[in-house]
Image (spheres, grey):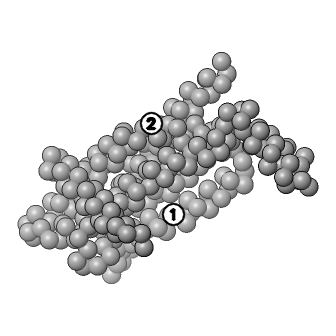
Amino acid sequence: MIPGWAQLWAAIYTSVLQLLNCFYSWIGDYGVAIIALTAAMRILMIPLTVKQTKSMQEMQEIQPKLKALQEKYKNNKEKLQEETLKFYQENKVNPFGGCLPLLIQMPVFIALFRVLGTPKSPKDPWSLINYIKALPAASQAAAKHFLFIISDITQSPQAMFAGKSFLSAIVPALPYLILVILFGVSVWLPQYMLTKDPQQRRMGSYMALFMLYIGWISPAGVLLYWITSSAWQIGQQWLIMRGYGKGSAA
């Protein structure tokens, strides 16, 4: 392991948990605090995500020409590399332009997922669920809710049905099931918007179906975080692509 790596992640997790508690102290609702913190992170990262989305859009637009090059020089790998590099330079496209912003963002979103997710142990110091459990019993119920919609953000949709009949669980579990559906859509829609390739869209659909299961077993707080982050990404992506399309048309 890289020296200091564990300490670095510990500092990131601690900072995220402290920020979340700071938002909670202002708002008084952990569900809303999760949404507010996620939105704040997204606002700070707007320059990075704009660059990432534009880069991905540019790569999508030049794919047909790249495929033509690959077909033309399929028997000459050295020439293919040379012509591909020349093509990128002539079109002022950086094939890795979307990677760096993503790499910078990932630690923040990993930390949010880690803090909001299922605790690694009953003594996990960076778990919001453990933090809430440590509160006085009288304060726990209020800390777990999200407005009047979700009764317990530490529970997963799966847990809402545990030990209960379907009919008795369906009504209190309905908001959780809606979160799972929104979670699946939030995984599928950005991929669908970014590409017109049928194969990539099909893969995105398969991924969304798999993520429905992940949503089924994840705490509601994680789903709130992911849906908020993806909704922001979808809206921002749409605005960037719309502006990019107008710029290209001009």
Question: Which residue matches tag 2?
Answer: 47
Q: Nearer the viewer, residue 119 or 165?
A: 119
User: Secondary structure under badge 1?
Assistant: helix
Q: Could you tell me which quadrant the C terminus lies in?
A: top right
Q: Position of residue 50 (x, y in %)?
A: 50, 37
Mark 2, Cα crowd under 10 Å, few <14 / some 14-19 / many 20+, is few
User: Secondary structure under badge 2?
Assistant: helix
Question: Which residue matches tag 1?
Answer: 211
Q: Position of residue 146 (x, y in %)?
A: 25, 55
Q: Residue furthest front?
A: 3
Which residue type carries mark 1? Met
Q: Position of residue 41 (x, y in %)?
A: 34, 45
Examine the image and state in which quarter residue 69 appears. Answer: top right
At x 61%, y 23%, the residue is 246
Name the front one of labels 2 and 1: 2
Q: Which mark is residue 76?
A: none
Q: Nearer the viewer, residue 152 or 161?
A: 152
Q: Position of residue 57 (x, y in %)?
A: 62, 39
Mark 1, Cα crowd under 10 Å, few <14 / some 14-19 / many 20+, is many
At x 49%, y 46%, the residue is 101
At x 31%, y 43%, the residue is 40
> Relative to residue 73, is residue 155 depicted above or below?
below
Q: CA distance from mark 2 to mark 1?
A: 28 Å
Examine the image and state in which quarter residue 92 appears. Answer: top right
Q: Nearer the viewer, residue 233 or 202?
A: 233
Evaluate whether residue 235 shows in this view: no
Q: Residue furthest bottom?
A: 163
Which residue type carries mark 2? Pro
Examine the image and state in which quarter residue 86 appears. Answer: top right
> Marks 1 and 2: in contact by CB < 8 Å?
no
